[in-house]
Image: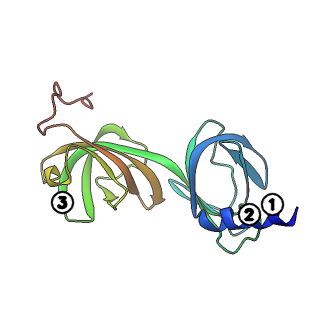
Amino acid sequence: MRLLGFALALLLAQWTEITGRIEKLGSHELRVDGMRISVTDTTMVIKGRTYHDLSPLVVGEQVRIKLDPHAEGRLVAQTISARATVAGTIIQASGEMLIIRPAPKRATVEPRSATTVHLNSNTVYAGTARQLAVGTEVEVVGWDVGYGEIDAARIAIYNGDLPMQGRPFRD
């Protein structure tokens, strides 16, 4: 039994982040893809703004959970970010960041005139990162980090070399 506990602790120590769909919500825990995750009074929930309870989340919603690395033998959430999307036109581009002017009614983050998108080594592109230039039309799926900003998981590029017809996010 001790060996099993040690193996579980070793496995948990390697996890820093979980992504998945919420299956169940309680007052101090949630279940995501079969895993029970505890929340504390210091856990931050980010969905448009920052909360310190699970009230903005709903069953079935996709989330990214960053885990407390100091929780021994259990999964404890430090931050829970809701899935976020934005479609629009790039108005500023750098190596690690985009600023997008959202198309009308095509953003799940707080409505603003511009949304900041953070790129990282895990961002997946439908096309290539070199196509991300001012004037390019994109759709971004990622994680809400608050303040109208998104950590990009996937980016679709609509006026690149891909065989797309028109702009799919036009109203």
Q: Quadrant of residue 95?
A: bottom left
Q: Choose the circle earlier in sequence order: 2 or 3.
A: 2
Say what amino acid the circle numbered 1 marks. Leu
The extreme right residue here reads: 1
Q: Is the residue 162 above or below the residue 155 in the image?
A: above
Report crowding for label 2: few under 14, some 14 to 19, many 20 or more residues within 10 A (C-alpha): few
Residue picked out by circle 2: 7
Residue picked out by circle 3: 92
Residue picked out by circle 1: 4
Asked if residue 40 can be seen in this view, the reply is no
| 49 relative position to 126: left or right | right
Q: Choose the circle earlier in sequence order: 3 or 1.
A: 1
Q: Position of residue 111 (x, y in %)?
A: 39, 49
Say what amino acid the circle numbered 3 marks. Gln
Residue at 42% in and 49% down: 142
Q: How many marks?
A: 3
Say what amino acid the circle numbered 2 marks. Ala
The extreme top residue here reads: 165
Asked if residue 22 can be seen in this view, the reply is yes
Q: Is the residue 27 above or below the residue 165 in the image?
A: below
Please report contact status of discs 2 and 1: CB closer than 8 Å, yes or no. yes
